[in-house]
Image (cartoon, helix red, strand yellow):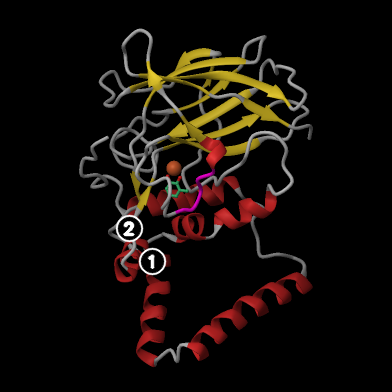
Amino acid sequence: MTQEPVNERATAAASGAAATRRFFADRQGARPGADQERVHLLVSEILKGVHETIRRHKVTYDEYDALKAWIISVGRDGEWPLFLDVFVEHVVEEVANADREGTKGSIEGPYYVPNSPLLPAETALPMRTDEAGTRLLFRGQVANVAGKPLANAHIEMWQADHYGLYSQFAEGIPDWNLRGTIATDEQGRFKISTIRPAPYQIPTDGACGRLIAAAGWHAWRPAHLHLLVSAAGYSSVLTQLFFRGDQHLKDDIASAVKSELILDPVPAQDGSGHEVTYNFVLAPA
Ligand code: MBD
Ligand code: FE
């Protein structure tokens, strides 16, 4: 897939501010940990790692000042949600889901919005009449680990558009564009028309972009669908699905790709774009 220049409408400042607001709206309970021993243990160990790196590499005052300026700018640019979700969340997810049965989890990232429009099992994600991109018919079934189909399971889905932009985080896109909550039918099935998202480049004009440039890294994530699948009595799975052949499967800046989460789309039978089947498996709560 060719990539067009992106992100003029998803500046670090705009998407960062929206992501920060969203985080506090969803996580009113997110407060510094109450467990003093745990705070002491974890913060001491992190600081020790920093101290050891400074000694081992004889970090200079110039480097220390560059770090200080950069950390201040992460906050100024509203990019703490982005930075943490790109560079840290994948390990939290790995630990949290180490013993999960069924569908593998992946990171949430900064762009989830709860309470997206409820849609039937066979549906199209909300999109603009002239929505750009290759059509994608995404279908499958939700079942439990014993193979029993789960009727009325909810598949919350959110994705970037053809230009790598997320509604509610980039300018000029309808609020619920490419976001929806699909309820499975009696057989646990779903059939969702959408478009293939584009590979996603994190904003390059803010603190995260400056770090990436300074380190000689790249800013790309492979194209992905975000999903949160839930059913009464089952443990929800928050995950992402990727596309076979994407050039960034092996070097996702957010380290979120797992081999079990790669889709193999084929040309659609009706000749309109691609179609793919993926089945979700939930474990008891
Ligand atoms: C994304 O779209 C995303 O999914 C993550 C994890 C980080 C930045 C942008
Ligand atoms: Fe994403």
Side of 43 relative to 157 (left or right): right
Q: Is residue 201 above or below residue 132?
A: below
Looking at the image, residue 254 lies above or below residue 102:
below
Position of the C terminus by quadrant: top right
Quarter of image, res 177: top left
**Image quarter of the N terminus:** top left
Looking at marks 2 and 1 on the same chain, the residue that comes earlier in the sequence is marked by 1
- Secondary structure at numbered mark 1: helix
Q: Secondary structure at mark 2?
A: loop
Q: Residue placed at 37% from the left, 62% from the top?
A: 208
Q: List x then y, in percent, for residue 200.
A: 35, 44
Q: Which residues are magenta?
A: 254-258
Q: Is residue 23 magenta?
A: no
Foreground residue among 143 and 69: 143
The residue to which callout 2 is attached is 218
Residue depicted at x 32% and y 18%:
273
Residue 31, how many percent across, how many down? 65, 60
What amino acid is found at the position of numbered circle 2 in the picture? His
Left or right: 61 in relation to 192: left
Residue 180, how many percent across, how many down? 49, 25
Residue 49, percent across and down? 59, 80
Residue under numbered circle 1: 76
**Residue with the most extreme left position:** 5
Mark 2 CB lies closer than 8 A to ligand 1:
no
Instruction: Indicate whether 234 appears above or below 118.
Output: below
Magenta residues: mostly which secondary structure?
Answer: loop
Nearer the camera: disc 2 or disc 1? 2
Q: Within the magenta stretch, is there residue 257?
A: yes
Q: What residue type is disc 1 on?
A: Arg
